[in-house]
Amino acid sequence: MLTEIDKMGAYEAFECIILELKMITLITFPPTFGEPSASSFCTKAMYLLNMAGVEWQRHDTNDPRKWPKAKLPAITVDGRTIGDSNRIRVYLETLGVDLEPGLSDLDKSTAVSIIRMAEEHMYFHVVMDRWGNDDVWPIVRDVYFKDIPKLPRLIITKGLRKQLMKGMHAQGLGRWTPQERMERLEPDLQAITQRLWHGPYLFGAVPSAADASVAPVLASMRSTPKPTALRRRIEDDKVLSGYIDRVATALG
Ligand SMILES: N[C@@H](CCC(=O)N[C@@H](CS)C(=O)NCC(=O)O)C(=O)O
């Protein structure tokens, strides 16, 4: 026979389990090079969760293999797993959160293109600057893959790097010289800067989902652990650097 105190204890334990299930857990790559995560997509997810004002906790891992599409970020919530930063955004929006406050329909359509520009073009410049640069790669390798002991790390990452560079060659950017890449990226940076002349965030006075995508990619460019041309381009730019820091303060 349960006493009232036993019942209270059982009820509290039950409540804890329910809370744990309801609590959003973000599966993310750990903080790296002074950024909240090695992945700008993981930082984006953190910014969106903060913007949404929901309670969440982080679970850091360097191994994405068992998560959807073998990529991070992902969240677990209500016994479900949701992978991909954009699906995380959709999930948050189903909770009734507005991640584009005050944006007109026209702004929202522009935001789609800006987000794609950051995630499907600018992001690959970071990949090339880190994985494709012989000066940077050894540092990146030893930080990203620190969980693998040194000798197997050298062997495993050699294969991974080769595979990734093959992908970059197929994508196209892997065929461009560092200088050609800088020329190709410049219009994207100019487009972002142009918008920032009009307000502190991409769509005016308050941050929105586009800032959660764009600022982490710029921050990754700036935090590469060697002063590459790409890193210098961003860190020497007061508008872009100020913007990265402003978004981190508002959404981090
Ligand atoms: N479209 C995905 C992209 C996520 C992504 O590319 N994540 C990378 C890290 S930046 C990853 O997990 N890579 C692991 C791998 O390819 O093995 C999103 O928006 O979440």
Image (spheres, rainbow, N blue to C red):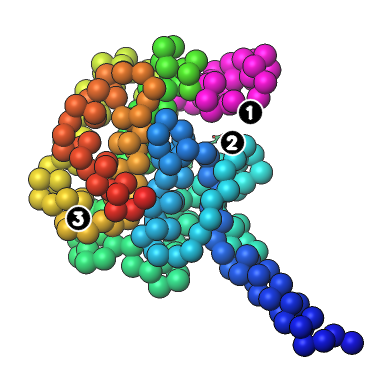
User: For this rendering, which residue is in front, 148 or 229?
Assistant: 148
User: For this rendering, which residue is in front, 92 or 114?
Assistant: 92
Residue with the mark numbered 3 = 203
* Mark 3 neighbour density, 10 Å: few (under 14) some (14–19) many (20 or more): many
Q: As drawn, which residue projects farthest toward the right?
A: 1
Q: Are dots 3 and 2 in contact, CB under 8 Å?
A: no
* In this view, 91 is above or below 245: below
Give the alpha-carbon distance from disc 2 to disc 1, as whole Å: 8 Å
The residue positioned 62% from the left and 62% from the top of the image is 80
The secondary structure making up most of the magenta span is helix
Residue with the mark numbered 2 = 62
Residue with the mark numbered 1 = 147
The residue positioned 53% from the left and 55% from the top of the image is 57
Q: As drawn, which residue projects farthest toward the left?
A: 197
Q: Which residues are magenta?
A: 141-170
Q: Is mark 3 within 8 Å of ligand 1?
A: no
Q: Are dots 1 and 3 in contact, CB under 8 Å?
A: no
Q: Are dots 2 and 1 in contact, CB under 8 Å?
A: yes
User: For this rendering, which residue is in front, 52 or 116?
Assistant: 52
Amino acid type at mark 2: Asn
Picture coordinates of residue 95, whole percent (x, y): 45, 71
Query: Judging from the image, what secondary structure is the residue with disc 2 in?
Result: loop
Residue 162 shown left or right of residue 220 in the figure = right
Mark 1 or mark 3, which is nearer to you?
Answer: 1
Residue 157 inside the magenta-drawn segment: yes
Mark 3 or mark 2, which is nearer to you?
Answer: 2
The residue positioned 27% from the left and 19% from the top of the image is 229
Answer with the quarter of the image where residue 98 lies: bottom left
Quarter of the rendering occupied by the N terminus: bottom right
